[in-house]
Image: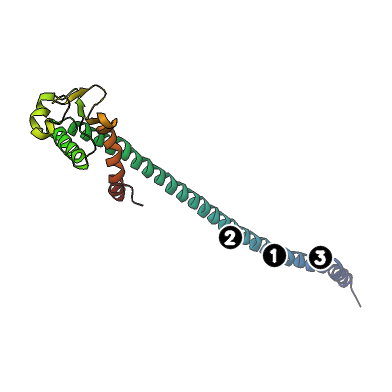
Amino acid sequence: METGKDKVKKICDVLRKETLEPSQKQAEEMLAQAGLQAQEIIAQARLKQKQLLSDAKEQIQKERAIFTSSLSQTSKQVIEALKQDIKENIFNKELLHLLKSEMNKPEVLSRLINAVIGAVEKEGIGSDLSVYIPEAVPAREVNALLLQNILGKLREKSVLIGSSIHGGIELKIHDKNISIEITDTSLEELIERYSRRDFHKIIFKK
C-alpha cells in the first residue's frame, strides 16, 4: 500500500522527467551548440587575423617598394644634378680660366702666329696680312718672339691690338677678305667638344 510519501516521490519523479530532464537536455544541447558557435567564431577570427596580417604585409611591401623606387629615383636625380653641376661649375669654369690664361701669354700667341702664317704661306692663300692680339698683351713682347720672316710678312711689320679680342689671335688676309680667329672663345667650344668623351667616361659614365 502506497504511503503519502511514496505518492509525493512519484509526483516528483514525473515532474523531473517531464520538466527538468527535457530542460537539462535542452540546456546541454544549447551549450554544445554554443561551443560549436564559439569554435566557429574563434576559427573565423583567426582566419580574419591571418588575412589582416597578410594584407598588412602586402601593403608594407608595396609601400616599401614605392619608397625604394622613389628613393632610387631621387638618388639618380641628385647624382645627375651633381654631374651637371660638376660639368658646368667646375669643368667649364676651369676650362675657360685655363684658356684665357694661356691665350694671353706672349709665347703662346707667338707660336700661334708663326704656325698660322706659316700654314697660310705654304698654301699660297694670301700675302697681305695683319694679326690682332688682346690689348692686355704687350705687342712688343709678341713681336720679339716672332720669327723674322713671319714678322716681315705683316702689313704693319708688327702685331696689332684688337679691342674685341680677350684671348688668342685674329689673322686678317686682306687681299682675300678672310679672317681667321683662334681665340679663347672659339677654342673653348672646340676643346670642350673633343675632351667631353674622356671627361664623360670618368664623370658621366652610367
The amino acid sitting under disc 1 is Gly
Among numbered discs 3 and 1, the one appearing first in the sequence: 3
Compare residues 49 and 92 and report the one nearer the observer: 92
x and y percent of residue 64 in the render?
Answer: 48, 51
- Is 199 situated left or right of 115 in this image? right
Q: Residues within 10 Å of mark 1 (few under 14, many from 20)?
A: few
The amino acid sitting under disc 3 is Ser
Q: Which is more foreground, mark 1 or mark 2?
A: 2
Quadrant including the N terminus: bottom right
As displayed, is residue 153 above or below residue 18? above
Q: Which is more foreground, mark 3 or mark 1?
A: 1
Among numbered discs 3 and 2, the one appearing first in the sequence: 3
Q: Where, by quadrant of the figure, is residue 100 drawn?
A: top left
**Residue positioned 34% across, 42% down in the render:** 83
**Residue positioned 28% across, 32% down in the render:** 176
In the image, which disc is placed on residue 35? 1
Among numbered discs 1 and 2, the one appearing first in the sequence: 1
Compare residues 7 and 200 and report the one nearer the observer: 200
x and y percent of residue 94 in the render?
Answer: 24, 36
Q: Residues within 10 Å of mark 2 (few under 14, many from 20)?
A: few
Compare residues 75 and 142 and report the one nearer the observer: 142
For disc 2, the marked residue is 50
In the image, which disc is placed on residue 23? 3
